[in-house]
Amino acid sequence: MNLAPLQFGSVKIEWPVVLAPMAGYTDSAMRTLCLEQGAGAVYTELTSAEGIRRDSEKTFQVLDAAKGEHPIAGHLFGRDPEAMAEAAKHVEQSGVFDWVDINCGCPVKKVVSRGAGAALLKDLDHMAKIIAAVRAAVSLPVSVKTRIGFNQDSADHLEIAKVVEGSGADMIAVHARLAKNFHGGDPDWEKLGEMKAALKIPIIGNGGVLEPADAERMVAASGVDGVMIGRGAIGNPWIFERVKSVPPASSGPRSPLEAGGTSLGERRAMMAEHLRRLVELNELKRKASSRPVKYSPEEAACIQFRTHIPYYVKGLFDKKQLLMKLVHLLTVDAIMEEVDILTEKNDDGRT
Ligand SMILES: Cc1cc2nc3c(=O)[nH]c(=O)nc-3n(C[C@H](O)[C@H](O)[C@H](O)COP(=O)(O)O)c2cc1C
């Protein structure tokens, strides 16, 4: 599949197939693995502008974890334009990030109840103020991650596109579902095409790219300048390179063992490396923190890794049973031992 490099301001994404921000997943461990496996760019997890203002240690940790990962966006949410501008300045001054991204699409209660994220889709005037305030505060490029609308009665995708571009954003990434639908239902890639036609700034399409061939289909349907992958990359960092190299004809139905075309051996090695990076990340956080903590870095890493494992072994095991087995395991050795027992049962001798 061919995609031209995507440029906005000083940011150039050579291969514009990028990792979506996913709270609870896309920490530095997952981001670095995806970058190494061909992701064109990454975003931090969702970071509260108010949190940065309050100097919250935890908030800083989300942002500060990023070192040497490029290109990377500092992904911010908030309601107050002034706090968002301040947070954007912090992102810029840290010297770690290539651009600032504003979340205008998160539908979770914690965010929407504060009037931020997807709530901004019901108040485009306010959304415009936030984007303009961030734009004025930094010289880094600014992007917006949003949706095609909040619900059927709110502003539509074209109004959203107009406001985002008119407020000074340099790029827009759009999840092709209404916020009220969370992740359910088919994404509406046609609307991405209509936004592309209406916009001068580049647009990255998002939503429903679970297989390499889906990326091709999205681009063919919409003409977007880039593709953003979320759930399809969990436990499957290989997907970014595969979008480039796997012809659509070969991406038909597969046996569970070949899901993603990755051998069990490769998957086991990636799991071990992912876990190792999580331990390292937690050790770094521990050193930087003065707070009392309940779990050791290794235990914290094992807990964080639990939700990734079912994706790495997708199709091979009953997810519920697997999670029940893993829930008590708090050492890397115990987890990898369990992974080995499980994968040996399914090994077809190729790995
Ligand atoms: C567990 C999870 C966490 C997410 N967290 C965020 C987030 O922090 N910020 C955001 O803009 N979108 C977030 N999203 C939405 C994704 O970025 C993406 O828009 C969505 O999953 C659709 O893409 P996909 O079909 O490729 O998964 C999250 C999605 C999931 C599944």
Image (spheres, rainbow, N blue to C red):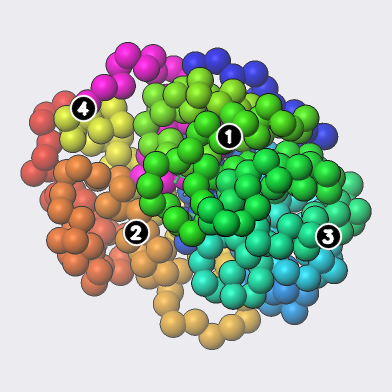
Identify residue for label 2: 307
Mark 4 touching mark 2, by CB under 8 A?
Answer: no
- Residue 309: percent from left, percent from top: 30, 53
Q: Nearer the viewer, residue 213 or 146?
A: 146
Residue 245 can be seen, yes or no: yes
Q: Which three-letter amino acid code belongs to the residue tagged 1?
A: Leu
| Mark 4 neighbour density, 10 Å: few (under 14) some (14–19) many (20 or more) | few
Identify residue for label 1: 192
Q: Tell me where the magenta segment starts and ends, as one range.
A: 226-253
Identify residue for label 3: 129
Disc 3 or 2, which lies upstream in sequence? 3
Q: Nearer the viewer, residue 283 or 223?
A: 223
Identify residue for label 4: 254
Closest to the camera, between mark 1 and mark 2, is 1
Mark 3 touching mark 2, by CB under 8 A?
Answer: no
Of all residues, the one furthest to the bottom in this rendering is 292
**For residue 209, which quarter of the picture?**
top left
Q: Which three-letter amino acid code belongs to the residue tagged 4?
A: Arg
Residue 80 colored in magenta in the image: no
